Image (tube, rainbow, N blue to C red):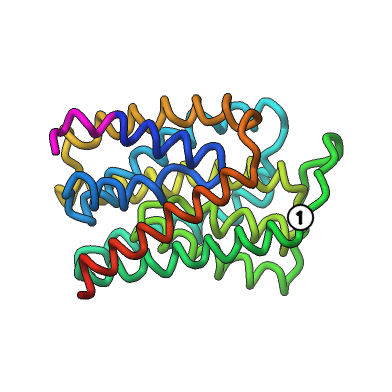
Amino acid sequence: MSSLWLFPIAVGAGAFGSMLGLGGGIILVPALTLLMGVDIKIAVATSLVGVAATSCAGVQTYLQSGLVDWRIAVRLLIPTVSGAIAGGLLLPFLSPRWVAGLFILLIFYVLGQMVWAMRHPRPASPQGGECRARWNPQQRTIAVGLSLFGGITSAILGVGGGLIQVPLLHAILKAPLRCAIGTSTFLIGATASTSALLYLVQGKLQPDIVVPATLGVLVGARLGAKFAQRVPATVLRLLFLGVMLYTVARLYLRWFV
């Protein structure tokens, strides 16, 4: 397939991920691998550049709205970035089959979270209130461990750490949901940028893939934010469920059969 398809595929990944609040990485990586024939490790590296770009573009809004808890963000930054460095150094030693297998597990984790959220809808977070999270010794140990794991996962799979950080900040550290998303967006930018620099040194960033994919994800994320309110959430989730189950089947058939 021609590389001219990279841009529209990335636009679709960014828009779909933005509408679901998942980021484009979980869609972009398998799309590049299955549709474009890109090596999965190069797809991961490319996705991280897109994640870093969208995070940097989006975090300004959260900063202006006071929705970043700097006290917690600074404390979680070191374990998160450390995890990103560890994941970036570990990836060269993992076979493409291992990366594909881990990505399949990640998809099942995301689908499980989505099904649980559909069956247990959360009340809307209040618009006001201070953007603060709790931080006691027990929570600190859990938070540091999960942040380290989130950084490793982000670096190896190219999806950003928000899938780990948002539940951590909201459910464990009791930050308001919008505050958790804003703080996570800040952390994701640092994590993805660190991993992307490591992959640049390792020669896994190819400009002819990275440039159109990153631009596409940025454009798609903006389009997704505009259309998110027009499409029923249930329709989006069911569509995402179908796409991800198809992706799992294709990844399994490619790497394990």
Residue 40 position within the rendered picture, expressed as x and y whole percent measured from the top left: 23, 56
Which residue is identified by label 1?
A: 121
* Residue 36: quadrant of the picture: top left
Q: How crowded is mark 1: few (under 14 residues within 10 Å), some or many (20 or more)?
A: few
Q: Which residues are drawn in magenta?
A: 1-7
Depth order, front residue of 116/124: 116
Residue 190 placement, left or right of 88: right
Q: In which quarter of the image is the N terminus?
A: top left
Residue 158 position within the rendered picture, expressed as x and y whole percent measured from the top left: 36, 52
Residue drawn at (64%, 43%), measured in percent from left and top?
Answer: 233
Position above or below: 197 against 150 = above
Residue 98 placement, left or right of 22: left
Q: Quadrant of the C terminus?
A: bottom left
Q: Is residue 4 magenta?
A: yes
Residue drawn at (51%, 66%), measured in percent from left and top?
Answer: 109
Residue drawn at (49%, 37%), measured in percent from left and top?
Answer: 55
Depth order, front residue of 37/202: 37
Give the tally of numbered discs.
1
Residue 231 position within the rendered picture, expressed as x and y whole percent measured from the top left: 61, 34
Residue 156 position within the rendered picture, expressed as x and y whole percent measured from the top left: 34, 60
